[in-house]
């Protein structure tokens, strides 16, 4: 055998078609992964009927306007399995949560929302919503800073949105 042929057999260079095939396969896999991510995002949006950020903002607006005007009106936003943790104390169930909110040491307040951050949570199309802002109490000169986190599981029936 010729030395040049032996050298090629020992150290074959990839053929252009093999390299191109490999590149196309890698590109196709990347596109498939991207498509899966897009489909998952779309599925999550369809599971609640609209964009999760829009749902979060609409919920936050409704929740805090109801809180400020009539805390008892929040009862239909909670379920028996809902949990509120406030200053280390856990309260479970719609009626218990509302009783806790009504018993807060202030009656009149106004929430001024500055941040609503939302991200998908869980395979059933759940959502984690972080809210921060200022809480202005009646008769107080300075507002208090507040933050609150909501975790929604849309697999369960949500009272505030028809699925």
Image: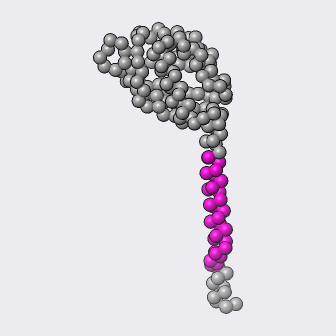
Kindly tell me whether residue 123 is visible in this rendering. no
Frontmost residue, 32 versus 108: 108
**Is 159 rendered above or below residue 121?**
above
Q: Position of residue 13 (x, y in %)?
A: 62, 77
Frontmost residue, 13 versus 61: 61
- Viewed as shown, does residue 70 lie left or right of 146? right
Q: Residue furthest left?
A: 141
**Is 71 rendered above or below residue 151?**
above
Instruction: Classify residue 127 by image quadrant.
Output: top right
Q: Residue at x 63, y 41 (%)?
A: 42
Q: Residue at x 56, y 35 (%)?
A: 52
- Viewed as shown, does residue 88 lie left or right of 38? left
Q: Residue at x 64, y 50 (%)?
A: 35
Q: Position of residue 76 (x, y in %)?
A: 59, 16
**Which residues fall within the magenta stretch?**
10-38
On the rendered image, what quadrant is the C terminus found in?
Answer: top right
């Amino acid at each position: 055998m010729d030395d040049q042929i032996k050298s090629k057999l020992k150290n074959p260079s990839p053929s252009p078609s093999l390299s191109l095939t490999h590149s196309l396969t890698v590109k196709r896999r990347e596109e498939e992964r991207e498509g899966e991510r897009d489909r998952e995002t779309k599925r999550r949006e369809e599971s609640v009927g609209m964009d999760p950020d829009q749902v979060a903002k609409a919920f936050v607006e409704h929740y805090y306007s109801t809180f400020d005007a009539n805390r008892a009106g929040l009862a239909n936003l909670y379920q028996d399995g809902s949990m509120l943790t406030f200053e280390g104390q856990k309260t479970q169930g719609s009626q218990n949560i509302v009783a806790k909110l009504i018993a807060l040491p202030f009656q009149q307040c106004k929430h001024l929302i500055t941040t609503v951050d939302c991200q998908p949570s869980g395979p059933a199309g759940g959502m984690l919503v972080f809210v921060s802002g200022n809480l202005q109490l009646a008769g107080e000169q300075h507002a208090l800073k507040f933050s609150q986190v909501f975790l929604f599981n849309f697999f369960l029936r949500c009272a505030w949105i028809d699925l």
